[in-house]
Image: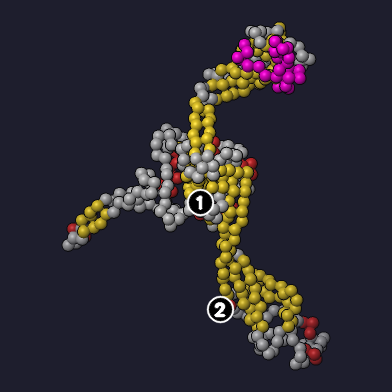
Amino acid sequence: MNAYKQFLTSDLIVSPFGVNKGFSFKQSEWGNNVQIDRFLGTSGSFLTNQTTTGTLSTEYQVLVYNSVKELYYSNFLTQSYGDSPQVGYIIPGANPEGDVLVGSTDSTGRYFNYLQSTLTASRHFPTGSGAEVAAVSVSSKLFGNYIQPYSFIFDYSSSFKAYDDGEGNLYSSASFAWTQSIGIFNQTITASANSIVNSGEIDFVPLITLPSGYTFVSASWASGSANSPFNEISIPTFVSVISASQGISVSSNKLSSNLSIIDFQNNSTPSPSDIYLYFESGSAVITSGSVSANQNVGNIIYPHGMAIFTNQNLPLNNITTLANTTCSFSSSLTIYETQYKCTIRENEFNFSLNPSLISGSTDGTVYGYVTSSYFSPFVTTVGLYDEAQNLLAVGKLAQPLPTTATTDTTILINIDR
């Protein structure tokens, strides 16, 4: 059986305290259970550019760019230390109709951009044609209230890491130079080699469809060089890959050689067997860039879990797509501990309601020792109830605690939430 006592306001103490936990995730672990995503933002018009970006979710590149600009950089579009606020004021007239507005009503410099420090902020945002930004978004279920300052590291490669300075800025850890070729599109087609007609021809059955607008580059034997019919004449030796530069050409029904470097010979070659045909389209455009050690490369918004790379000398597209990357940070979460002070006064709870104390008589008489002045009930469990006497929580004591008729007894119950 239970005995109840009402809490007073003074019996409850709520204390907040912060906890931190460090995380480090490779890109292969960024899936649904972790939810770290990357987005590429591109300047331009949504009417003409509706290219999408994102791994776990899909967003439009133009809208990502505009959202980042409006949320975090709208005060920093013309000056890295912030645009001067435009101020207007009213000269009162004899009545409201006579009030005169003086100055600019423009909103330049008056946006809230989630500055992460009380120091004078310096932010750089690219506004030119074709400008790009890269955003790394961490799920709030990981970082809690905010990402702990000084804890964020984005590991792009062995040559480049970005770290935060505790003031909302991202810097490169070392000098980093890169080069990449873009503009080349490729396509691979599998052909079934039916027979070696002669030293210069292998037939396909069935016929293949050549990709329109693409140029043949190379062919590879699916099972490697072990039974490949591709023979390098000058050595001679069988190879698994041959290319157009070696006098090889392809049509819908056959692979051909001009016999200058490569011929086709039976090498215990099974029939049919697959040949992979590689085609390319477009022309290569070489892009490159470099950043120096400790150079600003972007910003981090700690309570949003958002790291933004704005430096145009970084391979921003690769930052949002490259697989071999790692994201590390520490979370910060506020937990509230409620302490319930359960005070038993010296004149309270001095008689047990345990039915085992009844002697067995029909009138409810208890055993004699219960009425002794030395008898004291023991507390083993404290339950917390709501106004309707619904049990909400139970606190178990490590060992039974005797009450006393001479002093107050206080039991403290701590619950984290």
Residue at the left extreme of this rendering: 94
Residue 121 placement, left or right of 147: left
Q: Is residue 391 visible?
A: yes
Residue density around tag 2, few if under 14, some if 14–19, many if 20 or more, within 10 Å: few
Q: Nearer the viewer, residue 236 or 176?
A: 176
Identity, as a three-letter code, of the amino acid under mark 2: Ser
Image spot of residue 290 (x, y percent): 50, 36
Residue at the right extreme of this rendering: 360
Residue 218 placement, left or right of 103: right
Name the residue: 60% across, 68% down. Answer: 337
Q: Nearer the viewer, residue 205 or 327?
A: 327
Q: Start and end of the magenta stretch?
A: 222-247
Residue 39 placement, left or right of 345: left
- Residue 379's image quarter? bottom right
Q: Nearer the viewer, residue 315 or 214?
A: 315
Q: Is residue 195 visible?
A: no
Queried whether the magenta region covers residue 240, the answer comes back as: yes
Q: Which mark is residue 165?
A: 1
Q: Quadrant of the N terminus?
A: bottom right
The first of marks 1 and 2 along the sequence is: 2
Name the residue: 58% across, 55% down. Answer: 331
Name the residue: 58% across, 78% down. Answer: 11
Identity, as a three-letter code, of the amino acid under mark 1: Asp
- From this view, report whether residue 330 is shown above or below residue 180: below
Residue density around tag 1, few if under 14, some if 14–19, many if 20 or more, within 10 Å: some
**Which color scheme did the rendering employ for the protein?**
secondary structure
Q: Which residue is mark 2?
A: 10
Name the residue: 56% across, 47% down. Answer: 153
